[in-house]
Image (tube, rainbow, N blue to C red):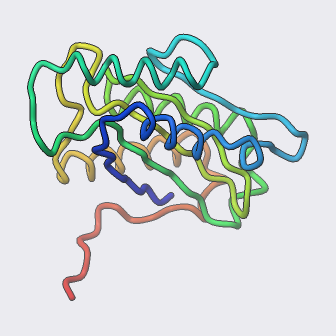
Amino acid sequence: MIVKAISHRATKKSSIRKLINYVFNPEKMKDADGKELVVKKFVGSYDKEKWADAYKKNDDSRTFEHSKRTVLRHEIISFAPESAPHLTREKLKTLAKYYLQERSEKAMGVATVHYDKSPHIHFIISGVSIEGRSTRISLKAFKAFKIKLQDFQQERFPELSHSIVDHRKKKDSP
């Protein structure tokens, strides 16, 4: 699976709401049966407006100030098209829960699946933990996390073998 990470620095509630509305666009979230999958961690309701309030309040309670701080992390895991027939609702839910727990143990997070083209999971993770500390991890730690995530995928869901990416391999320099 491929993992993509995008940092969002805008502190306005309207910017937070814009990302939430993009990720939780009902047109992209419906599976073949018309069902949506939402996974949450340290987020109370299913009301997107309350999510925006909670993320804003969480960011306002950070224990440090930084001009280039990350307010939200938008992360996406995608799978090879050949894996799509094997990606059941339960497998996607298991992967989303594992990601939210292991990526940043004390961070607020919500996730959903987009079913347009090939299924892929979108995550919105707070830039600071519920304790007010940064959820940033180094590139080395992020690479280790991706390896751990893929090991979990291979162990639990070997039928997703088309989505294997060798994260242990060094990238070629241009």
- Residue 139 percent coordinates (x, y): 19, 53
Residue at 42% of width from left, 45% of height from top?
A: 74
- Residue 87 percent coordinates (x, y): 71, 48
- Among the 4 quarters of the image, the one containing residue 119: bottom right
96 relative position to 60: left or right = right
Residue at 88% of width from left, 39% of height from top?
A: 34
- Residue 3 percent coordinates (x, y): 43, 55
36 relative position to 144: left or right = right
- Work out which quarter of the rendered image holds the C terminus and state it: bottom left
Relative to 147, residue 47 above or below: above
- Residue 91 percent coordinates (x, y): 66, 38
Relative to 47, residue 84 above or below: below
Q: Of residues 47 and 15, which is closer to you in this image?
A: 15
Which residue is most to the right?
Answer: 33
Residue at 54% of width from left, 22% of height from top?
A: 40
- Among the 4 quarters of the image, the one containing residue 107: top left
Residue at 17% of width from left, 52% of height from top?
A: 140
- Please count the marks in the image: 0
Q: Of residues 118 and 128, which is closer to you in this image?
A: 128
